[in-house]
Image (cartoon, rainbow, N blue to C red):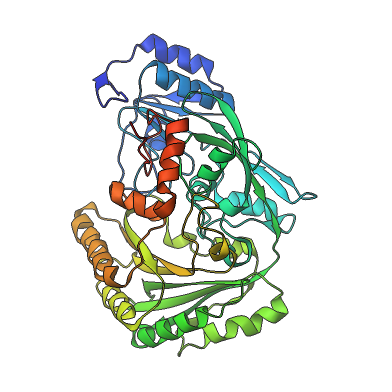
Amino acid sequence: MVATDEHQTLALDPTSITRFREALHGEVLTPGDPGYGEARRVWNAMIDKRPALIARCAGESDVMRSVQFAHDHNLAVAVRGGGHSVAGYSTCDGGLLIDLSNMKGLRVDAAHGTAVAQPGLRLGEFDRATQEFGLATPLGIVANTGIAGLTLGGGLGWLNGKHGLACDNLLSAHVITADGRLLNASATEHEDLFWGLRGGGGNFGIVTSFEYRLHQVGPVIGGMTVYPLSEMKQVLSRYGELCQGCPDELTTAAFLVIGADGQPAVAITVCYCGPLDAGEDVVKPFRALGSPAANLVKPMSYVEMQASFDAGFPPQRLHYWKAGFLRATSQEAIDVLVEYSTRMPSAMSGIGLQHLHGLASRVTPNETAFPHRFEFWDVPILSQWADPNESERNIGWARDAWAALQPFSEQGVYVNNLGVEGDDRVRSAYGENYERLVALKNAYDPTNFFRLNQNINPLG
């Protein structure tokens, strides 16, 4: 049985599946096929769904055939790039999963400072290839994240201050729309669609190729300085003050975690992408906010910096996230953060304060679909655990911490941190750009064919 786009179930003719298999350069998996169990898994172990069909696409023609097959059989559709959607939108029950994870082509044009990448690439794969030429583009902070979902949702990372968001560095994209067309979207072609792809998520089509602007990025000064619980309030207060004067080359974050000794700690993390000789003086104040328990800041490759948090986010743990923005690290907000760091039910969990400033904050809010163009801290409350029997406790902690921060939080949320939280929260992710995105959805996907995402509902 398969799930249809109208939320009904029906039997799919085996002959149709056979013809679909024969038409693809990649493979089609159904339950019981070798490899299906592994192929249906996504990063968040909270998500346990079973697609009726998994189309493991080898190229754009496979994606187009998959979209057509879904139309012909009225199937519900999910699209997977890196599979890191914490909400679980990169898979489905009973429908067709269009899996792009094998599409990992990458072409770097060092002479022109651009790269063309397919949607199955992870950040680490992209970074390793571009760093061969001393180049990079802003892409997240965990190397195992997929480039596709990250870019389409905006893309906060270590280079935001100097070079903007991932979506600010998108030059063009190949998009397969709900009606099966292959379009090239750029500043001069399908400009409305190009605007929506830069922050609007997977609402308007399947992106099969991303063209990025690249920047010269050599070794960085990066890493973390860890301070104990006894100094956490003082450190966070001084950290917030220091961030107000950060040069564009320095991007920072604070992470409230459980330290190696089993006690809460705060890790002040820096990434300076300017000249190394000047960077030592710039990062020095962040290494002297108190009496550190560990000081791991040093010159390193950008690839090493990008991978520095990978061990903390392995696949197949259970995740539940809540998130919001702080414009200021007030003492009241710090008190809440510290209190909930002492209540974490899992040593794998944490609370982040990722600073957005510099170039990323100076873009006009309606220049891209990503609207949050002011200086703030993105505050993801990251509940992570291993035992399904502990789910209620861990989810409750994240919700309670988020609720306690609301009196000090801005309206808005980073769409890539959203769980399944309803239409109002999706609206908060897009603010003043929401109605324009609805109009774009009406133009390119009026039937809401691409609905398994942080969905923008078309009118009518």
427 up-or-down from 289: above or below = above
226 up-or-down from 366: above or below = below
Do we see residue 380 in this rendering?
no
Q: Which residue is drawn at the image coordinates 21% and 58% (left, top)?
A: 390
Q: Would you say 173 lies left or right of 458 here?
A: right
Do we see residue 241 in this rendering?
yes
Quadrant where the image shows the N terminus: top left
Quadrant where the image shows the C terminus: top left
* Residue positioned most to the right: 111
* Residue positioned most to the bottom: 291
Q: Nearer the viewer, residue 435 or 358?
A: 435
Please give the count of numbered marks on the rendered protein: 0
- Which of the 4 quarters of the picture holds residue 219? bottom right
- Which of the 4 quarters of the picture holds residue 51? top left
Q: Position of residue 154 (x, y in %)?
A: 50, 53
- Which of the 4 quarters of the picture holds residue 335? bottom left
Q: Position of residue 281 (x, y in %)?
A: 64, 85
Q: Position of residue 367 (x, y in %)?
A: 55, 52
237 up-or-down from 247: above or below = below
Q: Position of residue 419 (x, y in %)?
A: 32, 51
Q: Which residue is drawn at the image coordinates 32% and 25% (left, top)?
A: 5
